[in-house]
Image: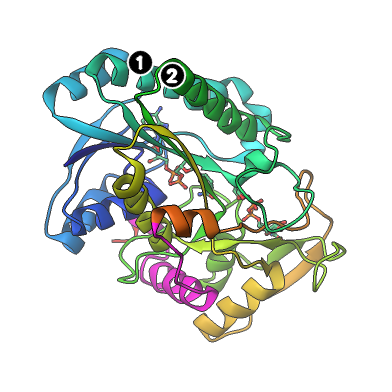
């Protein structure tokens, strides 16, 4: 089975391509390399023994995308491509809406023309906003987002849901990721943020490897077990497997399918610092700073629906997330440009 993977050179996409190839699914990658390095291809091939087909191009380029669809018998699309920095989305809203919303519309239009009616979309727990309680089930209200990035994810969910209302023979799967972290256990693939990392785990990893002096912890006065923010960190390999489970379980079943991909367990910032310190064998310097605007106190997933309907459950714990991130970061201190 051939599956078009937009954004397949990026962090989550690249790990998903490895797991697809291992499962006998052929990824056809489309990526504009805005936030990825071409070196990723060689890493995928080294791990799987297979070189995925890669098209360097932009999903907003409709003629280009049409040509990819007409060159292959594509069964489904996994749509990762997009911009994802929350803070940047506030200062560059038009770029975020153009890339994330317009890009998804162009993709859906090309799929329609090509008669491809199965899409798995990378959504985010951010669509739930600040939840009234935890764990968050898929039926919690969505849309109370606090930034253009989050709104762009919510808008694409709405566009695809409306598409399903109009054309009920589509299979539309919205996967709401919680906090993806970790790396391939080989240490050859991982997250490679450009500039100063926005997210906790890559920042911790760069402190551990000596690229950053210390971690700033954004607030220790939340009503959580130790006062720092609590999130549902999920290993990127579990997340990758979740996509394959979704393709297999519902990818050829008409419907609007919505799943949380998380572990069901919340960990605080201090829990993550402790887990990472254990993985890298040294205690990591940090300072307590004011809260970051827009952050919520705590968030974790209800996982029963994915478990029941996809037959998928995350299995890797924070110790493995930290160990694999450390292996990647210490082997590749400057990311994909290290080797
Ligand atoms: P990433 O930036 O590593 O990967 C995205 C990839 O898409 C990159 O390789 C980039 O070059 C490519 N891309 C961007 N715009 C494109 C375009 N117009 N045309 C073609 N390619 C384009 O990000 P990621 O962490 O792998 O995230 C993948 C998806 O998952 C994104 O849609 C993101 O919003 C979503 N998501 C990520 C997280 C997270 O914390 N990483 C959480 C929830 C949801
Ligand atoms: N944090 C720090 N210091 C840092 C970075 C983060 O203390 O340098 C804290 C945050 O305050 C928060 C926790 O670590 O309590 C996690 O923060 P991240 O930035 O790693 O992740 P977020 O939960 O804020 O957001 C992430 C993605 C979003 C996505 C969301 C889904 O960045 O794109 O998860 O749950 F929508």
**Residue at (40%, 50%) from the top-left corner?**
12
Question: Residue 255, percent across and down?
Answer: 41, 33
**Residue at (23%, 18%) from the top-left corner?**
114
Question: Residue 189, percent across and down?
Answer: 33, 60
Here the colouring is rainbow
Count of all numbered marks drawn on residues in the image? 2
Whether ligand 1 has any atom under 8 Å from the Cβ at mark 1 is answered as no
Which corner quadrant of the figure contains ligand 2? Answer: bottom right
Mark 2 burial class by Cα count in 10 Å: few <14, some 14-19, many 20+:
some
Q: Which residues are magenta?
A: 311-337
- What is the secondary structure assignment of the residue under circle 2? helix
Q: Quadrant of residue 149?
A: top right
The main secondary structure of the magenta stretch is: helix
Res. 306 in view: yes
The foreground one among 279 and 301 is 301
Asked whether 62 falls inside the magenta stretch, the response is no
Locate the C terminus by quadrant: bottom left
CA distance for labels 1 and 2: 6 Å
| Position above or below: 183 against 113 | below
Mark 1 burial class by Cα count in 10 Å: few <14, some 14-19, many 20+:
some
Asked whether 313 falls inside the magenta stretch, the response is yes
Q: Which residue is mark 2?
A: 105
| Position above or below: 16 against 169 | below
Q: Is residue 338 left or right of residue 137?
A: left
């Amino acid at each position: 089975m051939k599956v078009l993977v937009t954004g397949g050179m990026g962090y989550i996409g690249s790990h998903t391509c490895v797991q697809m190839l291992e499962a006998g699914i052929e990824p056809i990658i489309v990526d504009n390399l805005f936030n990825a390095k071409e070196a990723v291809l060689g890493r995928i091939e080294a791990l799987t023994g297979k070189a995925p087909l890669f098209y360097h191009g932009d999903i907003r380029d409709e003629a280009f995308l049409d040509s990819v669809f007409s060159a292959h018998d594509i069964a489904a699309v996994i749509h990762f491509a997009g911009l994802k920095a929350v803070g940047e989305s506030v200062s560059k809203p038009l770029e975020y809406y153009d890339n994330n919303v317009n890009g998804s519309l162009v993709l859906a239009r090309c799929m329609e023309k090509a008669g491809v009616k199965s899409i798995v979309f990378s959504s985010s727990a951010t669509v739930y906003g600040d939840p009234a309680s935890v764990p968050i089930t898929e039926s919690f209200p969505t849309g109370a987002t606090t930034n253009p990035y989050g709104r762009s994810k919510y808008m694409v969910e709405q566009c695809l849901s409306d598409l399903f209302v109009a054309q009920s023979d589509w299979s539309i799967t919205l996967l709401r990721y919680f906090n993806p972290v970790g790396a391939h256990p080989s240490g050859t693939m991982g997250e490679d943020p450009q500039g100063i990392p926005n997210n906790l785990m890559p920042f911790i990893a760069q402190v551990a490897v000596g690229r950053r002096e210390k971690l700033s912890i954004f607030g220790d006065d939340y009503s959580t077990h130790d006062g720092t923010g609590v999130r549902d960190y999920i290993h990127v390999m579990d997340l990758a497997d979740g996509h394959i489970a979704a393709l297999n379980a519902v990818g050829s079943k008409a419907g609007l399918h919505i799943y949380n991909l998380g572990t069901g367990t919340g960990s605080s910032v201090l829990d993550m610092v402790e887990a990472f310190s254990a993985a890298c064998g040294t205690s990591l310097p940090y300072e307590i700073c004011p809260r970051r605007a827009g952050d919520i106190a705590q968030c974790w997933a209800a996982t029963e629906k994915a478990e029941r309907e996809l037959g998928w459950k995350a299995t890797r714990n924070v110790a493995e997330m930290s160990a694999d991130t450390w292996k990647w970061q210490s082997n590749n201190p400057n990311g994909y440009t290290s080797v």
